[in-house]
């Protein structure tokens, strides 16, 4: 590519030199044309006075016409030379543009996370992934919000991210945009949350939990995850009656929030349930309830 650019630059220099020579020749031809014109006018005046013969006058007139034709021919040569120079400059611009393709420029500042090529590798146009770059100063995370909560999600709404590997830390985020339509397969709304990451504590690709506080007109009943008892006849919880007796009740579960479970039916608000019921907790036994420690 460098050799082709040098050849193109040499072609431009040669074309410009030819144009300069042609322009100098035009100037000389115009001078000769002016001299031939003055001479032809003089011979025409002398012919009117009868001092010179008609043949001598015709010779002077023909020399003037020849000089005019020579000027026109040289002017066309100058135009052709300028055209050649423009074509050479366009070729050089094309080569310079092609040379710019040798440098891969990212559309934004970031960190290269994947490199699939090395020096000397053949790259095919359009089907080779060269690099993957991540913009880490602001990260995006996507979550699917159930249909029952979709109406309450708004752009600009606050969200909080927690990372299992970074206990005790919360990262503030904001709802940037939504799909504005539910997925017909899952009946969920795709939501994008953007999180500032100027400190670089978060890394692209990490697993995160998003806490998107959405007010609900009919909030669900939640129980701790360690109160669930799974048996062959279905999920159950050990309910402690007011008299201290234990009664296992079948429940219908909703969503799983990790440390909490949504109960759709089978329980009522205010009922007490046993946490981590052991094998000693059986139907009808009497226990002494104790308040569990509050979760952080």
Image (cartoon, grey):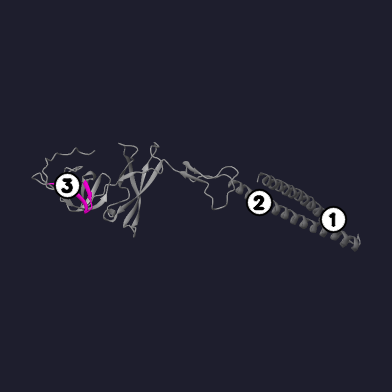
* Proximity of marks 1 and 2: CB atoms separated by less than 8 Å: no
Residue highlighted by disc 2: 91
Residue highlighted by disc 3: 238
Q: Nearer the viewer, residue 42 or 62?
A: 62
Left or right of 277? Residue 157 is right
Residue highlighted by disc 1: 39
Q: Range of the magenta residues?
A: 228-240
Q: Nearer the viewer, mark 2 or mark 3?
A: 3
Judged by its main secondary structure, the magenta piece is: strand
CA gap, disc 2 and disc 3: 84 Å
Q: Nearer the viewer, mark 1 or mark 2?
A: 2
CA gap, disc 1 and disc 3: 128 Å
Residue at the location (24% across, 53% down)? Answer: 254
Say few, some or many: other residues with alpha carbon within 10 Å of mark 1 (under 14 / 14 to 19 / 20 or more).
Answer: some
Name the element at disc 2. Answer: helix
Residue at the location (70% across, 46% down)? Answer: 7
Q: Position of residue 210 (x, y in %)?
A: 31, 45
Left or right of 78? Residue 124 is left
Q: Please tell me which of labels 2 and 3 falls first in the chain.
A: 2
Residue 217 appears in view: no
* Proximity of marks 2 and 3: CB atoms separated by less than 8 Å: no
CA gap, disc 1 and disc 2: 47 Å
Name the element at disc 1. Answer: helix
Q: Please tell me which of labels 1 and 3 falls first in the chain.
A: 1
Please give the count of numbered marks on the rendered protein.
3
Q: Which mark is residue 252?
A: none
- As for residue 234 lying within the magenta part, the answer is yes
Q: Please tell me which of labels 1 and 2 falls first in the chain.
A: 1
Q: Position of residue 201 (x, y in %)?
A: 38, 37
């Amino acid at each position: 590519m460098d050799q082709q650019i040098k050849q193109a630059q040499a072609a431009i220099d040669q074309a410009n030199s030819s144009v300069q020579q042609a322009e100098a020749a035009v100037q000389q031809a115009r001078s000769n044309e002016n001299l031939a014109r003055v001479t032809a006018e003089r011979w025409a005046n002398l012919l009117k006075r009868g001092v010179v013969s008609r043949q001598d006058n015709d010779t002077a007139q023909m020399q003037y016409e020849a000089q005019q034709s020579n000027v026109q021919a040289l002017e066309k040569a100058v135009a052709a030379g300028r055209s050649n120079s423009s074509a050479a400059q366009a070729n050089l611009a094309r080569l310079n543009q092609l040379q710019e393709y040798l440098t891969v420029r990212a559309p934004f500042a970031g960190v290269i996370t994947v490199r699939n090529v090395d020096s000397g590798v053949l790259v095919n146009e359009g089907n080779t992934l060269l690099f993957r770059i991540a913009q880490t100063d602001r990260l995006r995370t996507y979550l699917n919000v159930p249909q029952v909560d979709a109406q309450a999600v708004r752009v600009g709404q606050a969200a909080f991210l927690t990372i299992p590997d970074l206990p005790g830390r919360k990262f503030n985020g904001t709802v940037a945009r939504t799909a504005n339509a539910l997925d017909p397969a899952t009946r969920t709304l795709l939501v994008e949350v953007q999180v500032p990451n100027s400190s670089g504590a978060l890394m692209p690709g990490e697993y995160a939990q998003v806490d998107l506080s959405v007010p609900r007109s009919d909030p669900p009943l939640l129980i701790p995850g360690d109160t669930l008892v799974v048996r062959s006849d279905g999920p159950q919880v050990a309910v402690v009656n007011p008299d201290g007796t234990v009664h296992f009740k079948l429940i219908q579960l909703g969503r799983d929030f990790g440390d909490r479970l949504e109960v759709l039916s089978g329980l009522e608000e205010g009922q007490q349930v046993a946490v981590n019921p052991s094998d000693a907790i059986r139907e009808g036994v009497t226990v002494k309830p104790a308040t569990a420690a509050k979760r952080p």
